[in-house]
Image (tube, helix red, strand yellow):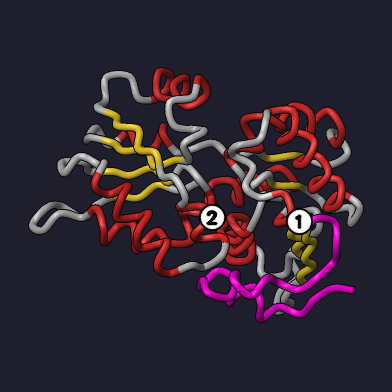
Amino acid sequence: MDSGIGLLAAAAAVRNLRPDADLVLSSDPDGMPWGPRTPQDVTERALAACEAAAAHRPDALIIACNTASVHALPTVRAHLEPRIPVIGTVPAIKPAAAGGGRVAIWATPATTGSPYQRGLIRDFADGVAVTEVPCPGLADAVQWADEDAIDRTIAAAAALTPRDVTTVVLGCTHYELVAERIRAAVQQPGAAPLELHGSAGAVAAQALRRIGERPAPRPGVLGTLTVILSGRTESLPKAALAYAEGRSLGAVSHAG
């Protein structure tokens, strides 16, 4: 579940780990963007998207959205657990800080400087030089695959990123879809290769750990894909196919 197509990265990571998994992608394009909404409104919209997915009786549910994880995770868990394990998304600040170099955290303006993010920095990056970089408009640009807007918003965020950073945390799931473009914008000539830390791989692995081998892997079987957009069962949005993750999922047969 995500507000929009930011969930593609986590879904593709699950597909890589378990090709036979039947995936249900539930998002809320009618309500985007969630960032400017009140915490109560985000919680209500996130819960609706989660309940739409839960109607398909999944073995686990990933909240592949930082904003929803901040505001709605306790409410969603109260509604769905223990029947359905719920896995939230946390910016990968802890592994990014472990390298000891200077870290930049790219996030939405609503998350940048928030008590939530500052708490993660305090808990997991104490003693590490951390710069919080707001990225206004980048998630929306990725959502609609607006190439000019993606270039413009990445360039603006790169200009706010110290030149000596060694690591960038992608603090919004949408950003993982343009990770290499972010790397190219921030990488300095002659410097060591920039490290990027997203959350998709970790949350996918955690979801599979939570369910164990239930159901057992089905060798040679490719799972189905069901797409729910603001409660409506539809196909992947056209913009999703602009990204490698969306194209890989789009090749999967759809469940009725």
Q: Is residue 130 left or right of residue 63?
A: left
Q: Residues within 10 Å of mark 2 (few under 14, many from 20)?
A: some
Which of the two marks, 1 or 2, is nearer to us in this view?
2
Q: Are marks 1 and 2 in contact (CB under 8 Å)?
A: no
Q: Image point 68% across, 40% down: which residue?
A: 87
Q: Earlier in the sequence, mark 1 or mark 2?
A: 1
Q: Secondary structure at mark 1?
A: strand
State which region is magenta. Answer: 230-256
Q: Is residue 59 left or right of residue 251?
A: right
Q: Residue at x 45, y 52 (%)?
A: 138
Tell me residue 254's x, y (percent): 80, 76
Q: Residue at x 61, y 44 (%)?
A: 65
Which amino acid is tagged 2? Asp
| Rendered view: 87 above or below 184 | above
Q: Give the alpha-carbon distance from disc 1 to disc 2, as whole Å.
A: 17 Å
Location of the C terminus by quadrant is: bottom right
Q: Which mark is residue 74?
A: none
Q: Position of residue 144 (x, y in %)?
A: 56, 65
Q: Is residue 194 left or right of residue 46?
A: left
Q: Nearer the viewer, residue 65 or 95?
A: 65
Look at mark 1 in the image and give the residue it sits on: 26
Residue type at the position of mark 1: Ser
Task: Tell me the quarter of the picture where residue 245 sits.
Answer: bottom right
Badge 1: few (under 14), some or many (20 or more) residues near its Cα, within 10 Å?
many
Estimate the x, y position of residue 70 in percent, counting from the top left.
62, 30
Q: Which residue is mark 2?
A: 140
Q: Give the residue displayed 40% in from the left and 67% down from the top.
A: 148
Vertical position of residue 202 compared to residue 132: above or below: below
Q: Is residue 244 magenta?
A: yes
Front-lying residue, 19 or 191 = 191
Q: Residue 234's quadrant in the figure?
A: bottom right
